[in-house]
Image (tube, helix red, strand yellow):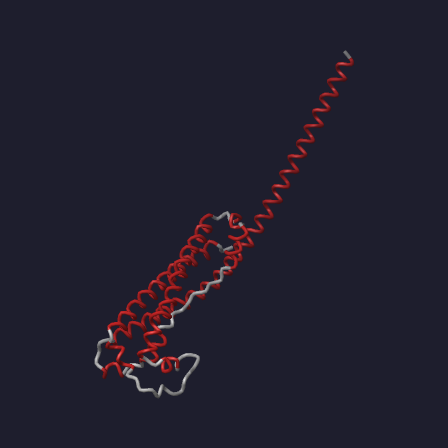
Amino acid sequence: MIKENKASKYLLYAIGEIFLVVIGILIALQINTWNQERILKIEEKGIVKSLHNEYLQNKKLITTSITQSETCIHTLKSIMNLIGKDEEFTRKANSDSLLFYAFDPPIFRPSENTISGLIQSGRLELIQNKDLVNLIYEWGRTMKALTDNSKRVMINLDDRVFPYLSKHYSLKDMDAYGELQWENKTILAIDKLKIFEDIEFENITDDFIYRVLYNKNKLVELETIIDSILKETEQ
């Protein structure tokens, strides 16, 4: 009987020891989980702060690009207004300046270091704010559409606009308004105003307005996304 009691006590003691060990392990695991969650929260906070700072810069850049796009479109429309008019009317306009600024659209180059790093490293999943994650993906899709069209705009300039102008206009006279800053106009005989009587030039200009307007609309969409990202990343 005494032996049975001792055996029962030892068994209960052993069970108690095992229970305490298990509890200790569970507590240690929970503490480790809390520490990991705390570290991830700190990392997430740093990511959100970096995103906010990056898009504050992009906000300034895109505001400038939208303004430049609007100026470009306005100038292109001024050129369209000269087409088909009599020579006396077209001579009053500074066609050299108009052409230089009309066919010099802005290229939006935002800072995307933080987003690129998040996507490449797979750390985007650290962001718990799903609205912010969706905005980041929306930014990527809209930015791709803008970039693709911007490439087509540059190809259009190289393949259509400048080849036409180099045959029918003086690029030197246009470049007087750029970095070259020519002081004297071309001395070669050329009737530059003939382009305003040419349907090909009208079509080239009309097509170019459409392309620049598409870019401007995408910039406006991106500006809205930036505003939303800034709102979601305020701390």
Percent position (x, y) of residue 185? 36, 86
Instruction: Answer with the quarter of the image where residue 148 lies.
Output: bottom left
From the viewer's perspective, is 52 left or right of 187? Answer: right
The quarter of the displayed image where residue 6 is located: top right
Q: Quadrant of the N terminus?
A: top right
**Residue at image point 69% right, 30% down:** 20
The spot of residue 118 in percent (x, y) is: 52, 53
Q: For the point 70% across and 24% down, which residue is it? A: 15
Q: Relative to residue 67, is residue 18 drawn left or right?
A: right
- Residue shown at the point (69%, 31%) measured from the top left: 21
Percent across and percent down for residue 135 are 43, 53
Q: Is 171 situated above or below 38?
A: below
Q: Quadrant of residue 82?
A: bottom left
Q: Nearer the viewer, residue 232 or 178?
A: 178
- Residue under the image location 35 percent in, 72 percent down: 103
Q: How many marks?
A: 0
Q: Residue furthest top?
A: 1
User: Residue 98, relative to residue 49: is it above or below?
Assistant: below
Q: From the viewer's side, name the closer residue of 158 and 143.
A: 158
Q: Position of residue 116 (x, y in %)?
A: 51, 56
Judge from the rendering whether residue 197 lies leftward or rightward of residue 39; answer left or right: left
